[in-house]
Image (tube, rainbow, N blue to C red):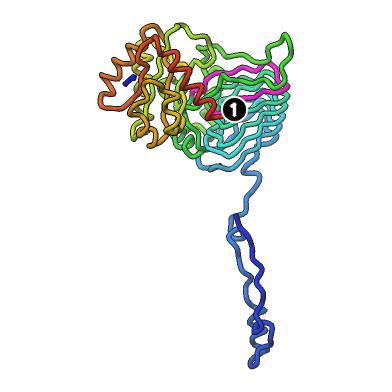
């Protein structure tokens, strides 16, 4: 430790162009009765657009249960004072001209685009998040890339905290990592000098105070939901908030059967001791990245990074480096990990790894 389809035209042969020498009339009739060739796209079930649109609802609870979208896109338009629950993974979701709605979106493989909306409270997990011409939108967010706001005011962001039984599978189906969450790294595309268009939600914000559980009379009453930190699929990170200590520690798990479980165990152990999780990343590394990122402690790591992505965590608090070594010895004995060697080098370790990760992810 320290440590595509192309359709080819077919030229008819001479025999095909010639009339048949015998039974010509029968041959002609048979050809006329032949069924046209069917292609795979002709056999596909026709899509009902209404299945993928929620439009014009008011004062009600609407949405989609698990298995209803299965990776399709969804459009939400002109809804007012609605509770909207999408307990499924999807390709993209757009929300337009909605007012005073509470929204939960399961993992979105592509983008979530909110436009011309106001007084919204949302729980969102996605690859890309963007708003335009919005007012007072509060979002508990998990976003793999940098969230972008444009011509929007009164925006507030918090870390995604949510659970329903299928959520972990939906994250996987959407190709999202629970460890890649840039919820607080917001880019304002249209800043106004002297004004702040966005801020962070209170650290102790309770999600159910913003987005309540489904009405017991609704079709979603059977979905078991939790917003407890200990049950959330996405780890709670402090993100861009000010660190309380000058001491941080880099802790890296290498690819294996239990990488996610081990990272979760570390978070539980460290937070129980009063330390704070600042940020996490899951990225792939190449052998040539090892020396640059781990520097003097790179020996023996080249083979490990070929097995898959690494999961890295930054933990913060006085005495956190020593505590992480103790946890590793007690809980992860026999598991190859990297931990900052000392508090004198830990800041450099954290900066080296997360700067590398951000570049890899285009942040």
In magenta, the rendered stretch is 144-161
- Rendered location of residue 274, percent (x, y): 38, 10
Write the residue at 65% across / 15% down. Answer: 198
Residue 50 drawn above or below residue 116 = below
Relative placement, left or right, of 260 versus 80 is: left
- Rendered location of residue 322, percent (x, y): 32, 11
Write the residue at 42% across / 33% down. Answer: 287
Q: Quadrant of the C terminus?
A: top right
Residue 173 shows up from this direction: yes
**Label 1, on which residue?**
103
- Nearer to me, 227 or 124: 124
Residue 104 shows up from this direction: no
Inspect the magenta stretch and tell me whether residue 145 lies in it. yes
Relative placement, left or right, of 347 versus 202 is: left
Inspect the magenta stretch and tell me whether residue 20 lies in it. no
Badge 1 crowding class, 10 Å Cα cut-off, few under 14, some 14 to 19, many 20 or more, is: many
- Rendered location of residue 119, percent (x, y): 67, 20
Relative placement, left or right, of 326 versus 340 is: left
Residue 290 drawn above or below residue 274 = below
Write the residue at 30% across / 17% down. Answer: 327
Picture quarter containing residue 27? Answer: bottom right
- Nearer to me, 122 or 147: 147
- Nearer to me, 191 or 173: 191
């Amino acid at each position: 430790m320290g440590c595509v389809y192309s359709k080819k035209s077919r030229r008819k042969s001479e025999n095909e162009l010639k009339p048949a020498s015998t039974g010509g009339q029968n041959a002609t009739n048979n050809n006329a009765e032949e069924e046209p060739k069917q292609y795979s796209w002709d056999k596909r079930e026709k899509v009902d657009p209404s299945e993928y649109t929620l439009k014009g609802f008011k004062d009600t609870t609407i949405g989609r249960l698990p298995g209803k979208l299965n990776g399709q896109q969804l459009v939400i338009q002109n809804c007012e004072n609605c509770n909207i629950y999408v307990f499924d993974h999807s390709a993209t979701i757009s929300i337009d001209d909605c007012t005073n709605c509470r929204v939960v979106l399961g993992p979105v493989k592509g983008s979530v685009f909110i436009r011309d909306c106001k007084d919204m409270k949302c729980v969102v997990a996605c690859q890309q998040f963007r708003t335009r011409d919005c007012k007072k939108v509060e979002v508990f967010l998990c976003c793999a890339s940098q969230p972008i706001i444009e011509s929007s005011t009164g925006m507030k962001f918090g870390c995604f905290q949510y659970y329903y039984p299928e959520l972990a599978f939906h994250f996987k189906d959407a190709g999202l990592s629970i460890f890649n969450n840039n919820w607080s790294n917001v880019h304002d595309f249209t800043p106004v000098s002297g004004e702040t268009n966005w801020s962070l939600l209170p650290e102790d914000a309770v999600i159910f105070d913003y987005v309540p559980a489904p009405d017991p009379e609704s079709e979603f009453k059977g979905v078991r939901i939790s917003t407890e930190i200990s049950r959330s699929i996405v780890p709670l990170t402090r993100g861009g908030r000010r660190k309380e200590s000058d001491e941080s520690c880099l802790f890296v798990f290498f690819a294996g059967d239990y990488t996610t479980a081990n990272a979760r165990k570390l978070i539980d152990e460290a937070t129980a001791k009063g330390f704070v999780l600042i940020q996490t990343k899951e990225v792939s590394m190449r052998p040539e990245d090892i020396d640059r990122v781990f520097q003097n402690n790179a020996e023996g790591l080249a083979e490990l990074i070929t097995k898959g992505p690494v999961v890295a965590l930054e933990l913060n608090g006085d005495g956190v480096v020593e505590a992480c070594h103790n946890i590793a010895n007690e809980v992860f004995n026999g598991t190859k990990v990297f931990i900052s060697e000392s508090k004198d080098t830990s800041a450099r370790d954290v900066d080296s790894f997360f700067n590398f990760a951000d570049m890899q992810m285009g942040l």
